[in-house]
Each structure stands twice: as structure tokens, then as C-alpha cells.
Image (cartoon, rainbow, N blue to C red):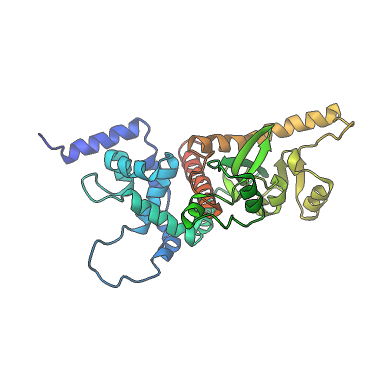
């Protein structure tokens, strides 16, 4: 069987780019070394011996997690796709025939990042790259939240009472405790029940890049984390949000902080909104629709579901989803806007 030569591989890679492979543009755009300082924290213990295989480079492993998030892959699927796809191997600087990270290696690397709570510093590192590229937050900010579902727990009524009180049942074995998510919560939206977490984001109106974010259990009301999301660096003081964020105290607090509220008005019992107020809401909805585009793209990347256990892992998953969205968005702005 004839082995493919260098020019055969080069031609195939060029064809992939013509067919729309986004990875070469992303690889060229992102300063991957800019993440190394944060990633190297997982190597805080020096190796005792040079025996055995050397660990994969932390930047390569981080790029593996980016691929995993971008294409909504499990750890096993990630290993398989790296071995199978030329585009993945080129992005990582690996070869299918050579040594590639297996599923366990991917899991362990992600767990190390979770334990050291590095997702926020990693997100901040890329935010610095966004600013350096000239994409300053402009034209005001849009705040919203999206439910990220978790696998439903089949617990008894008494167990749920204890879980809500922050005390997992004492009769659960250690193995059972590891398999139970006691930090996700139930909530209702439009009459439908959901179990899991929330992704709260603030995006700038001009570039539609996520500037700030936080993750909570699903039962946390959107308005409770608004202060964490407000971006004082935006060139405009305008803040758009739906009516869930509106209250008299909130309107006053925003004004005191120098922001201009563009939050939707809401009617009261027996006092429906005037036509003028409804028209103002319709105009605000046209601006707020931009944040729905973000959640739509994240849904395509598996953003509506976490398969992990507990808040720490869910927060890492949500943070990676926001980070990878920004990477893709900035690539689009650089190449097509």
C-alpha cells in the first residue's frame, strides 16, 4: 500500500481549508502561549525522575479542551477524533500515528484545572487578547442568563429536604455521594421545570463578545448577580436586560453607579403597560436579541447540558463554553466582519 507523501498531506489540508475548516484561522489568531502562565500552575510539583513518559505540554492539552468544547465531544470521542481527523492533528501539532492524549489524560488534565479554579483566569487571559486586538467593549452592554441542564437526580422526598438544607443524607455511601449532584437545583421557566445551573453573561452591543460571566444553580434569580456582570469599561453606560432584572431599587442603584437603564418595563396587577411603554420594550427587544444569538451558538456546542457532577465542574464547563464562544466570535470578526 502506497504511503501518502508530504505534498499529498499538504494538498488534503489545503482542501479542508477551502471546504470551511475554521481551525487554521483560529490557531493563527489566538496567542496560545498567553495561557501558559495560568496552565503551568498544574505543574507546581517538579518531576522526581525523568523515567517514564513525559506529560503532554499544557498548552497542547488546553487546545484539546477547546476542541472538545467546540465540537461537543466526550473524553472518549475526543481521543478518537484526534486520531481520526487531520484537521484536529494539525491544530494540535500532533500526528495520528504518534502519541496522542487518551480519554483518561484529558479527564485528569481538566480535573486539575477545576481543582485550581483556573477557568476565570483563563477567560481573563483571552479577554486581554481581545482588548489588545482593538475590540473594546462599546455601545452598551446586554445582560441575560441561560439555563444549563444537568442530569436529573432520582432522590426520595426526605433526601431532597436534606440536600436543600445543604446536608447530603448520612446513609449515602461514599461512592453514591460521588455520583449525586447535590448543588444543582430545580427552576421553572415558561411553565416548564428545569434542573441544573445557569450561565449569566454580559455582552457588549458592538462586538457581541462576552465580557463578564458567572455560573450559579438554576434557582438563583437572574437579578441577584447583576452587579457581578456590569462592565464599567464599556464606552456606553447603557444596560439592556429583560424585565426580570427590573425593580425600583435596581433602577436607583444603576443610576447611582453611573449606568443608564434600558431594562424592559413590566406591568403590574391591574395596571397593564401603556402602548408607549410597549413600544419602548419592542425597541429594546431588537437590541436584546443579540444576546440570544450567543446562546444559540452555545447550544450548538452543547451549551444547554452539563454531564458533570457538582458546581465546580459545571462552572468550568460553562466558563469553557463562554471562552470558546469568544474565540470563535473573535475569529469571525477578524476574518469576515
Q: Position of residue 235 (x, y in %)?
A: 67, 49
Residue at the extreme top of the image, as rendered: 275
Furthest residue toward left: 1
Asked if residue 206 can be seen in this view, the reply is no
- The answer to whether residue 293 is left or right of residue 82 is right
Give the left or right position of residue 47, taking residue 210 as reference.
left
Judge whether residue 245 can be spotted in this image: yes
Picture residue at 40% right of the left edge, 41% below the top: 73
Residue 297 image point, x, y percent = 52, 36
Side (left or right) of 47 relative to 263:
left
Q: Decide which of 181, 217 is in the foreground and name it.
A: 181
**Position of residue 57 measured from the top left corner of the image (x, y, whole percent):** 33, 58
Residues 216 and 209: in front is: 216
* Quadrant containing the N terminus in the rendered view: top left
The vertical placement of 6 against 132, above or below, is above
- Which residue is located at x 54 percent, y 42 percent? 150
Q: Number of marks in the image?
A: 0
Question: In the image, what residue occupies the spot 58% across and 34% down?
Answer: 293
To which quarter of the image does residue 26 belong? top left
Of residues 12 and 303, the one drawn nearer to the viewer in this rendering = 303
As drawn, is 81 to the left or to the right of 276?
left
Q: Quadrant of residue 10?
A: top left
Q: Residue furthest right?
A: 270
Classify 282 as above or below 76: above
| In the foreground, 325 or 5 | 325
What is the x, y in percent for residue 11? 24, 35
Amino acid at each position: 500500500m502506497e504511503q501518502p507523501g508530504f505534498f499529498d498531506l499538504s494538498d488534503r489540508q489545503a482542501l479542508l481549508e477551502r471546504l470551511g475548516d475554521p481551525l487554521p484561522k483560529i490557531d493563527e489568531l489566538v496567542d496560545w502561549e498567553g495561557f501558559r502562565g495560568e496552565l503551568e500552575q498544574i505543574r507546581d510539583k517538579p518531576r522526581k525522575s525523568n523515567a517514564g513518559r513525559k506529560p503532554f505540554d499544557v498548552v497542547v492539552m488546553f487546545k484539546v479542551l477547546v476542541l472538545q468544547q467546540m465540537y461537543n465531544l466526550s473524553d472518549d470521542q475526543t481521543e478518537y477524533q484526534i486520531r481520526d481527523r487531520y484537521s484536529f492533528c494539525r491544530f494540535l501539532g500532533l500526528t495520528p500515528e504518534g502519541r496522542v492524549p487518551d480519554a483518561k489524560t484529558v479527564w485528569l488534565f481538566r480535573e486539575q484545572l477545576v481543582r485550581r479554579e483556573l477557568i476565570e483566569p483563563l477567560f481573563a487571559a483571552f479577554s486581554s487578547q481581545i482588548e489588545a486586538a482593538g475590540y473594546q467593549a462599546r455601545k452598551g452592554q446586554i445582560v441575560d442568563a441561560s439555563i444549563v441542564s444537568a442530569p436529573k437526580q432520582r432522590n426520595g422526598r426526605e433526601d431532597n429536604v436534606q440536600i436543600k438544607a445543604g446536608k447530603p443524607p448520612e446513609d449515602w455511601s461514599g461512592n453514591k455521594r460521588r455520583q449525586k449532584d447535590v448543588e444543582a437545583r430545580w427552576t421553572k421557566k415558561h411553565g416548564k421545570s428545569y434542573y441544573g445551573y445557569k450561565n449569566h453573561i454580559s455582552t457588549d452591543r458592538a462586538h457581541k463578545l462576552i465580557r463578564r460571566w458567572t455560573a450559579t444553580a438554576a434557582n438563583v434569580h437572574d437579578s441577584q448577580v447583576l452587579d457581578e456582570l456590569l462592565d464599567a469599561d464599556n464606552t456606553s453606560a447603557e444596560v439592556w436586560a429583560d424585565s426580570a432584572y427590573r425593580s425600583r431599587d435596581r433602577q436607583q442603584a444603576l443610576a447611582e453607579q453611573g449606568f443608564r437603564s434600558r431594562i424592559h418595563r413590566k406591568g403590574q396587577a391591574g395596571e397593564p403597560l401603556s402602548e408607549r411603554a410597549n413600544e419602548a420594550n419592542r425597541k429594546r427587544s431588537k437590541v436584546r436579541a443579540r444576546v440570544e444569538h450567543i446562546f444559540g451558538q452555545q447550544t450548538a456546542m452543547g451549551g444547554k447540558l452539563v454531564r458533570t457532577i457538582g458546581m465546580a465542574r459545571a462552572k468550568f464547563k460553562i466558563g469553557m463554553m463562554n471562552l470558546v464562544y469568544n474565540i470563535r466570535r473573535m475569529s469571525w470578526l477578524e476574518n469576515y466582519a
